Image (cartoon, rainbow, N blue to C red):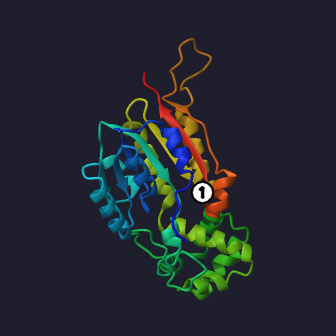
Amino acid sequence: MNHIPVLLNEVLQTLDDINGKTIVDCTFGAGGYSRAFLECGANVIAFDRDATVAPIAEKLANEFPGKFQFINEPFSEIINHKSEIIDAIVFDLGISSMQIDTPERGFSFRFDATLDMRMGNAPHTAAELIENSTVAELARILADYGDVKKAGPIARAMKDTLPTTTFELRDLIHNPKDIAPVFQALRIAVNDEMGEIESALAAVPELLKPDGICAIVTFHSLEDRLVKNTFREWTTSPGDPRLPITIAAPFKLLKTFTPSDAELSHNPRARSAHLRAVRKISH
């Protein structure tokens, strides 16, 4: 399946007029968001730790000379690429269709492949993570990152068999409903996805210019809860509300979106997507 940018129209609506503005696309992937931003006249700085997307980035750089910059690093590194003119920071979290649909990457239980799951230069593959973790550590990963109900028994089975391929892992999971959550949990752990999001979010308030927007598309409850809670902190006035002098919140919450029926009809993978956004208040 070709990669289809999720909630693209809603992201563009949230960012409003971006002609001449500088946008950081933290999750370049197949370049759907970046291309749309460039076609609207924006300047784009794109991050992706997956080196396989470099040819797509090179093509965009050639099509939009002087308007596009690609950085082959995790988006947690945005703090090290400061600019005084960042008008928007956009995240399309989760895994890309390209990664799922490339069998040798080992992300999908639909294909028999080496149990890898690395998005970039992660230190360990999923197979190595299983081998190097205790049953208790694996059970925690499955429960925390996949909400797997029988995390303990599955973790023990994983340690007993030490699967090295996707089918070996799939076949030791007796309940079909647990297969996708187990794969998700291992992928998140292998790539430290939650740590990446936390580090990147911590950098956003400093990087955005006044009136700048941070827009984030999430795909599962764990990352959505982290984004939602962070945005709540940013949009809540600090201090004691009973005091006569209050400090204004640094951000304003913008309208949230979920995919329309029309989008879901041609892109079923968008069904769990949720767009949240905030605007930095100019004081």
* Image quadrant where one finds the N terminus: bottom right
Residue 272 visible within the image: no
Mark 1 Cα within 10 Å, few/some/many (few <14, many 20+)? some
User: Is 187 displayed left or right of 50 in the figure?
Assistant: right
Q: Please tell me which residue is depicted at 52% across the width and 67% down the height of the picture.
A: 97
* Image quadrant where one finds the C terminus: top left
Q: Looking at this view, name the residue that lies furthest to the top.
A: 244
Q: Label 1's element? A: loop
Q: Looking at this view, name the residue that lies furthest to the left.
A: 66
Q: Amino acid at mark 1?
A: Phe
In the image, is residue 194 above or below residue 115?
A: above
Q: Indicate the position of residue 37 as horizontal and vertical percent values.
A: 41, 47
Q: Please tell me which residue is depicted at 52% across the width and 64% down the height of the picture.
A: 95
User: Is 145 displayed left or right of 23 in the figure?
Assistant: right
User: Is 142 displayed left or right of 12 in the figure?
Assistant: right
In the image, is residue 202 above or below residue 269?
A: above
Q: Indicate the position of residue 114 as horizontal and vertical percent values.
A: 49, 84
